[in-house]
Amino acid sequence: MTESILGIEYKGGEVICSQGEAGDRMYVLQSGRAQVLRSEAGRDVVIGELQAGDIFGEMSIFDRSPRSATVRAEGRATVMTLDKKAFLRRVHEDPSLAFHVLKKMSERVRKLDEELSALREITGEAA
């Protein structure tokens, strides 16, 4: 991991943030790719892939809960971080940032709803 004006550069396999750690900032993947992993029953399960332009860790800006997943660089990746104060300042300067974050969160909720419905269909569980 090296820091530059553009953000923090991670090498392949380096952890950007870890499941369970305290969260106080969000991230913007400026270049490269990353995997989103959850530790389940002692093993890591890939639950998502991120690419340049994606945001992650944004929930901690709002609820300050522990990280719900680990994000690990896949090859070289550059990441910018924003704490709550910087995020609010940027939203004040450019309100479309808030819309972008809400759009991403909405897309994730919609995807989770679809996955939950599919699981219920497979298991025969009623809603």
Image (tube, rainbow, N blue to C red):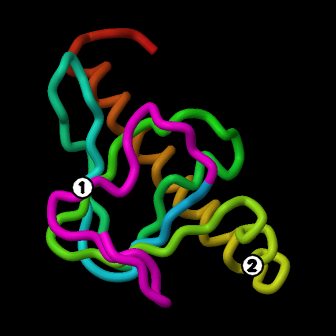
Q: What residue occupies the far top of the structure in this picture?
A: 125
Determine the residue positioned at 27% across, 24% down: 119
In-image side of 57 versus 62 (left or right) = left
Q: Residues within 10 Å of mark 2 (few under 14, many from 20)?
A: some
Q: Is residue 11 above or below residue 109?
A: below
Place of residue 69 in the rendered image (x, y in percent of width and height, measured from the top left): 38, 40
Place of residue 15 in the rendered image (x, y in percent of width and height, measured from the top left): 29, 53
Identify the residue under disc 1: 35
Numbered disc 2: secondary structure: helix
Identify the residue under disc 2: 90
Numbered disc 1: secondary structure: strand
Place of residue 19 in the rendered image (x, y in percent of width and height, measured from the top left): 39, 36
Determine the residue positioned at 54% across, 34% down: 66
Sequence-first disc among 2 and 1: 1
Query: Is residue 62 shown to the viewer in this render?
Result: yes
Tell which of 123 and 12 is nearer to you.
12
User: What stretch of residues is rendered in magenta?
Assistant: 1-24
Place of residue 76 in the rendered image (x, y in percent of width and height, measured from the top left): 20, 76
Q: Label 1 is placed on what type of residue?
A: Gln
Q: Place residue 114 in its image quadrant.
A: top left
Q: Quadrant of the N terminus?
A: bottom left
Tell which of 27 and 119 is nearer to you.
27
* CA separation in Å, label 2 and label 1: 26 Å
Q: Place residue 72 in its image quadrant.
A: bottom left
In-image side of 3 versus 118 (left or right) = right
